[in-house]
Amino acid sequence: DGGITQSPKYLFRKEGQNVTLSCEQNLNHDAMYWYRQDPGQGLRLIYYSQIVNDFQKGDIAEGYSVSREKKESFPLTVTSAQKNPTAFYLCASSPLAGGRTGELFFGEGSRLTVL
Amino acid sequence: LAKTTQPISMDSYEGQEVNITCSHNNIATNDYITWYQQFPSQGPRFIIQGYKTKVTNEVASLFIPADRKSSTLSLPRVSLSDTAVYYCLVCALLYGNNRLAFGKGNQVVVIP
């Protein structure tokens, strides 16, 4: 089945540790995105990528890093520099065709809790 | 980047039509308007997308006035399972301005 897969679904880490969240898609989409969601809040864009080996900062990139070595993969690392990393992280992908961005497909999310 | 503004929350009774508005005063010529639905602890799901006038699919209708500074998502005869957060997203053109930033959304609660 085609889709977008995030792992792990739940993750607990100690303060000061780096954490990498996985995001894989088999939809052959060009663009991929990482969002952060805090309780009762909307989605805030962390990073996005439109093509392999290229990515751009979103609105809250500080304390995060990404890579896009393969079209289907866009892992997010939450570094120790991120002051408040406990949140729900959502990865998405979209096709880029016809001169505009298509529908966003989201994964099921990864809930990170820093103890 | 066009910002969007939505009411924070609204309640509706089961079986009624629900209309959710979104303001996007700074929408650009090439921007499309897209609506998503999100249930707790899940990723948002695409509902509908439009550019102008009216778009309808099996789930909802989207009304966009001529000036495109606002849009209205219409959900016919809602059920309890329509309780969710609804996001309005103004999609910038790809290649160079593809940030796809969401607003805070509108919490819709359907009451029996």
Image: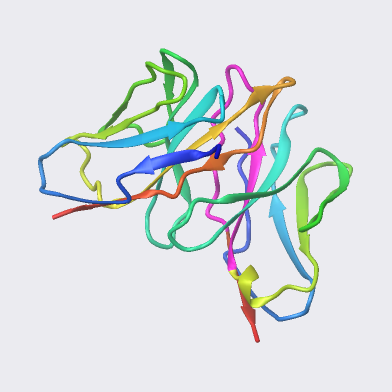
Residue beneath the point at 69% across and 53% down: B22
Residue in the foreground of this view, choosing between A61 and B84: B84
**Magenta span includes A68:** no
Figure label count:
0
Residue beneath the point at 32% across and 32% down: A76
List x then y, in percent, for residue B55: 85, 47
**Magenta span includes B93:** yes
List x then y, in percent, for residue A101: 65, 29
In the picture as drawn, the residue positioned furthest to the front comes out as: A1
Which quadrant is home to the N terminus of chain A? top right
- Left or right: residue A41 compared with residue A65: right
Residue beneath the point at 16% across and 36% down: A18
Q: How is the image coloured?
A: rainbow
> To which quarter of the image does residue A73 belong?
top left
List x then y, in percent, for residue B30: 75, 27
Residue stretch in magenta: B84-105
List x then y, in percent, for residue A57: 41, 26
